């Protein structure tokens, strides 16, 4: 359909849906013209929508992200919606730094958002999402995407994890990374309230450089999983074959982040609960 106002069109069931440029000024005029022209061709069931000219990109937990002016990469852990109506992307603070306004982008340099103004008390960072033209997806999406299985996810902030527990991540580098949770109250240097995770086999590490920020998922039953932590790195730095890795506990890190943001965060576990 060679009309500059028409962005897209196609039949949705028996109705011809026409996507028209949202910048069209005379909407009633273009609709009357199209209705008349198409009616002469015997097409009478029409539906009009007004849209932008660019496809809205979807962002998935587990995607690689980069920091403006910084050579390393990390993983977009998940999205969170706040009580004040903001959307945040969560990742590792040691990757983002602490400079308010730092631009965080996808690996193809498409802007994701900017670092929120927070005095961070833990290694988890909040990126204030540029809401448009971005549509965040929930954790359930990447679970289904990676496992080809729809699992119920529970994001309760549990305080009594069972160990050992099989866990995994969908990181920018490890898709998936498989491991076993062996400690829920680990201390390393000045860091506390950490999870200690071991690789299932030395030849297959739980995570790799670039996975920082990935959400650690624990499986508690056949059809139930929980989000329990966020990867921050490995602890056995001298080992050529790393087998132990550290993650911050979400039940400790999220309340600390909420205190600094002065806002309540709700993890987006379903693309329907945005």
Image (spheres, rainbow, N blue to C red):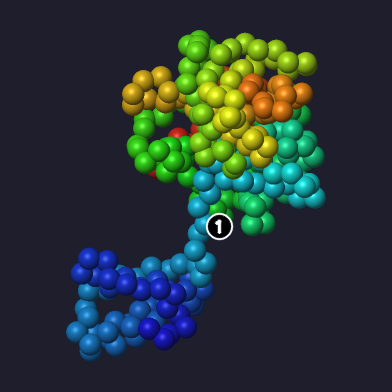
Left or right relative to 74: residue 86? left
> Which of the pair 186/158 is nearer the observer?
186
Residue at the spot 62% in from the left edge and 11% down from the top edge: 185
In percent of width and height, residue 48 lies at: 35, 71
One can see residue 262 in this view: no
Q: Where is residue 9 in the image (x, y as percent from the top left)?
A: 36, 74
Measured from the top left, where is residue 22 in percent x and y? 48, 70
Q: Which residue is drawn at 50% across and 24% down?
A: 167
Q: In which quarter of the image is the N terminus?
A: bottom left
> Looking at the image, which is closer to me, 25 or 119?
119
In the image, 129 versus 62, the foreground residue is 62
Judge whether 144 appears above or below 10 on screen.
above
Residue at the disc numbered 1: 133
**Above or below, comparing residue 35 to residue 138 in the picture:** below
Q: Which residue is drawn at 43% across and 85% down?
A: 3
Q: Which residue is depicted at the point 71% across and 22% down? A: 235
Question: Along the line of sight, which residue is nearer the eye, 136 or 199?
Answer: 199
Left or right relative to 11: residue 148: right
Residue 102 is situated, as x and y percent measured from the top left of the image, at 75, 45
Label 1 element class: loop
């Amino acid at each position: 359909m060679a009309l500059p106002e028409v962005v897209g069109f196609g039949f949705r069931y028996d109705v011809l849906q026409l996507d028209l440029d949202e910048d069209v000024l005379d909407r009633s005029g273009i609709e009357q013209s199209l209705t008349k022209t198409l009616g002469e061709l015997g097409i009478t069931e029409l539906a009009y929508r007004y849209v932008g000219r660019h496809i809205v990109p979807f962002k998935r937990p587990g995607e690689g992200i980069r920091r403006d002016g910084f050579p390393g990469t990390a993983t977009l852990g998940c999205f969170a919606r706040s009580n004040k109506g903001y959307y945040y992307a969560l990742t590792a603070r040691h990757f983002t730094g602490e400079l308010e306004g730092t631009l965080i982008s996808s690996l193809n340099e498409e802007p994701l958002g900017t670092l929120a103004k927070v005095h961070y008390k833990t290694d988890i960072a909040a990126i204030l999402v540029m809401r448009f033209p971005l549509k965040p997806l929930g954790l359930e999406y990447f679970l289904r995407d990676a496992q080809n299985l729809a699992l119920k996810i529970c994001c309760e902030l549990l305080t009594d994890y069972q160990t050992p527990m099989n866990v995994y991540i969908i990181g920018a580098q490890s898709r998936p990374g498989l491991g076993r949770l062996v400690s829920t109250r680990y201390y390393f240097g000045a860091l506390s309230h950490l999870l200690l995770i071991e690789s299932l086999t030395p030849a297959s590490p739980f995570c790799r450089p670039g996975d920082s920020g990935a959400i650690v998922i624990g499986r508690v039953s056949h059809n139930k999983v929980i989000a329990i932590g966020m990867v921050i790195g490995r602890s056995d730095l001298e080992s050529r074959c790393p087998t132990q890795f550290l993650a911050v506990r979400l039940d400790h890190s999220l309340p600390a982040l909420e205190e600094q943001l002065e806002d309540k965060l709700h993890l987006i576990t379903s693309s329907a609960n945005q």
